[in-house]
Amino acid sequence: MAKNGNGNGKSNGNGRAHGKANGTGNGSARPHANGKSGTGPRPVPVRPGHQSESKAPRGTLIIIGGHEDKEHDMLILRAVAERARSGKLVLVTVASEEPDEMWKDYQKVFGKLGVKRMEHLHVDTRAEAKLEENHGVLDGATVVFLTGGEQLKLTSQLGDSPIFEKIHDVYMRGGTIAGTSAGASVMCETMLVSGSASESHRIGSALRMAPGFGLIAGVIIDQHFAERGRIGRLTAAVAQNPRILGIGIDEDTAIVCEDHHCFRVLGAGAVYVVDGEDVTYSNLTDEESERTLSVFGVRLHILSMGDEFDMSTREPSSRPAEEIEKELVGRN
Amino acid sequence: MAKNGNGNGKSNGNGRAHGKANGTGNGSARPHANGKSGTGPRPVPVRPGHQSESKAPRGTLIIIGGHEDKEHDMLILRAVAERARSGKLVLVTVASEEPDEMWKDYQKVFGKLGVKRMEHLHVDTRAEAKLEENHGVLDGATVVFLTGGEQLKLTSQLGDSPIFEKIHDVYMRGGTIAGTSAGASVMCETMLVSGSASESHRIGSALRMAPGFGLIAGVIIDQHFAERGRIGRLTAAVAQNPRILGIGIDEDTAIVCEDHHCFRVLGAGAVYVVDGEDVTYSNLTDEESERTLSVFGVRLHILSMGDEFDMSTREPSSRPAEEIEKELVGRN
């Protein structure tokens, strides 16, 4: 069980539920054994509470809060580019309404940053996601970059598809998965889809969540964080199950997880960690739906460049910003 | 000393520094003994760490996060109106650029809510603030309502003036001081004047603070809180001295302090309490000014209607929203 050797994939969750909601839940859509990636059994996303049992991923996640700098020092994209040097960077624009423009923009930027091989992956339907000509571009990729747009497009079109499997495989084998904005939210087991940020959270208001790609366990990620004033909605998500750690990432800011339980902060803004472990009270189930949410005893950490966070112990630690800047980027 | 019986007022802080900054620090401007309010020595605002030594205020503060409902159930203004019933409500529009419009609006609303006696107090200069015809309207007031606008107009024009003294006196003798938006911020010893909320706090960025009216001790208040995404700037203010508790109040939401160390929440939104007591680290003095602020270990409480907070123990407690609604408003 721990090794996921049963090969039928029936309990592999994540993208699955979503695929069904999109009407593609017929048996033929299940890729039982795509031997191409060379790992045998179907990959299992890292799952809550099961990290030690399943194979730990060897790759890196770079999770960006949107609007990363593409003109000046480009710290974050530089860190992404560095990881692609020896291999291929695949830009996945599935979330976006303007895939071709995005491809042109990123191609230019990553070109400047020294990336030699880049490919563009875009599909508009789940059927396209299953075509070899589409998922084939991921073979040999060392970096996959998920652009912004709408996170449900990513999960509904790619969940449980060969594209997702190959992305996951890149991560398991030591590659880098980077995502910005919608591409950041989608990294989680359960992702935030939408929710008002113009006022504090009302108990019954629509805080939409959906199953994500599950590349990072035990956290829920929100992006454009300070810019869109999202502390209320992230805290509301955490209050629903304090097992989940809330991570709010500002624009032009990223967390870099080279180890599946630790991350470091890179970029201009801040990363907010909302820890509900010591929450003593919430009115979530007590009050009528039009009432405003109360939550007592949230632990909040505001991290900036250089800082690290251990997701297993839930403890932050500080490092001078300059040090990390040199370490992450200086190698370039 | 505790009784402030020396009568020269030299060490009475607060409004003073500001008065001087506005060029009115000449001896003649000091009202050494305005016998009119009948309290003898000059009133001392409640001061940090000196609450037990100075006379405790007997009045109520209603501190509103701006844009309080004026059309529907008017919960907050109803609670203000109730306290004026037997006496006089004075509307102070000094913060505003449109004093006459504000007066008309509030006159109408408070009239609907049963307030029989209302007066309008507006001055454009410190000289006007000293005229008997202006501060005289405060004699016999049971409620003073400070409108929104710019908080520095309130402190620079009223600080250390007979108007401020009479407002303070109303509070000490058991009256109610209500303030919305700028009128809320000004209640503190040290008030937030401005600071960016569109991004996380940069260490060297202009988080402007100034001495406030000092009616509530040991806290710093921010308003329009969720609506303008101000968690970053409030946390930055708290990080500068965690002795101060940060209180962020949403629009159409108020804290009601009937006791100088406790408050209850009233209204539609939330109140955020930022407690820096357990902060383990901040890079405030370590990093260059363009870096983003890090703060580890902030305790955050989100309170909604019905909830109470004890500022001396820094502990929240919950009460059903309906209960408080009836209690605070039902008496009307």
Image (spheres, coloured by chain):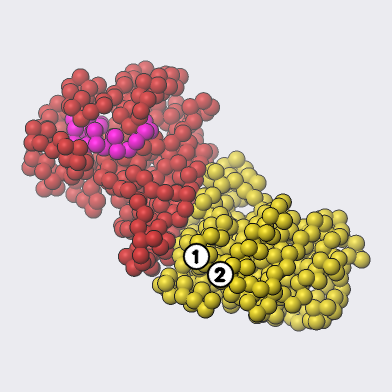
Chain colours: A red, B yellow
Q: Mark 2: which amino acid? A: Arg
Query: Which disc number belongs to residue B78?
Result: 2
Q: Left or right: B235 with respect to B100? A: left
Q: Residue at horizontal 74%, vertical 81%?
A: B2
Residue span colored magenta: A145-170
Q: Nearer the viewer, residue A188 or B318?
A: B318
Q: Mark 1: which amino acid? A: Asp
The reply to whether discs 2 and 1 touch (Cβ–Cβ < 8 Å) is yes
Sort mark 1 into few (<14), some (14-19) or many (20+) by Cα contacts within 10 Å.
Answer: few
Q: Left or right: A230 with respect to A258? A: right
Dot 2 or dot 1: first in sequence order is: 1
Q: Is residue B294 magenta?
A: no
Q: Secondary structure at mark 1?
A: loop
Which residue does the numbered mark 1 point to in the structure image?
A: B73
Q: Secondary structure at mark 2?
A: helix
Figure check: A283 above or below B195: below
Mark 2 to mark 1: distance in Å?
Answer: 8 Å
